[in-house]
């Protein structure tokens, strides 16, 4: 059985933000909560200089694709539940290691 790497992209709008500082507060709160709750790799990967838009990347490792998909779906649900930002889109990408190496 190989390693399964999951990548989740969360496309967010922070409608209440009127400055980069207020947007960063919302995004930092979300990323820290995800990291502390699930020990994930989480990073804002796009939109750093936009006042109301952000693209967050989340990555995790598992041994099962179905477990990984379920886990990343839970991250999406949690983001909707806890974030002050509105989730306007998400993409899940799954990568498999090559067991022959």
Image (cartoon, helix red, strand yellow):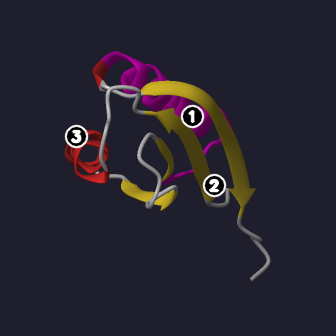
| Foreground pick, 65 / 59 | 59
Per the image, label 2 sits on a secondary structure element best described as strand
Disc 1 vs disc 2: Cβ atoms closer than 8 Å?
Answer: yes
Magenta segment, which residues?
A: 58-81
Q: Are discs 1 and 3 less than 8 Å apart at CB? A: no
Residue 34 location, quadrant: top left
The residue that disc 3 covers is 33
What residue appears at the point 74 percent right and 83 percent down from the top-left corner? 101
* Residue occupying image coordinates x 31% and y 52%: 20
Q: Main secondary structure of the magenta part?
A: helix
Q: Which of the pair 72/67 is nearer the observer?
A: 72
Residue 61 location in percent, x, y? 51, 55
Badge 2 local density, few (<14 within 10 Å), some, or many (20+)?
Answer: some
Mark 1 sits on what residue? Answer: 67
Q: Quick one: quadrant of the N terminus? A: bottom right
**What secondary structure is found at the residue carrying circle 3?**
helix
Mark 1 and mark 2 lie on one chain; the one further toward the N terminus is 2
Looking at this view, is 20 or 71 the one in front?
20
The location of residue 23, given as percent across then percent down, is: 31, 44
Asked if labels 2 and 3 touch by Cβ distance under 8 angstroms, the answer is no
Residue 100 position (above or below residue 13): below
Q: CA distance from mark 1 to mark 2?
A: 9 Å
Quick check: 99 left or right of 8?
Answer: right
């Amino acid at each position: 059985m190989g390693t399964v790497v999951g990548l989740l992209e969360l496309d967010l709008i922070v409608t209440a933000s009127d400055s980069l500082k207020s947007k960063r507060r919302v995004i930092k709160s979300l990323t820290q909560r995800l990291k502390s709750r699930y020990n994930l790799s989480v990073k804002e990967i796009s939109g750093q200089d936009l006042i109301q838009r952000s693209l967050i990347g989340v990555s995790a490792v598992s041994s099962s694709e179905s477990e990984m998909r379920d886990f990343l779906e839970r991250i999406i649900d949690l983001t909707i539940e806890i974030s002050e930002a509105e989730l306007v889109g998400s993409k899940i990408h799954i990568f498999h290691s090559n067991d022959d190496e």
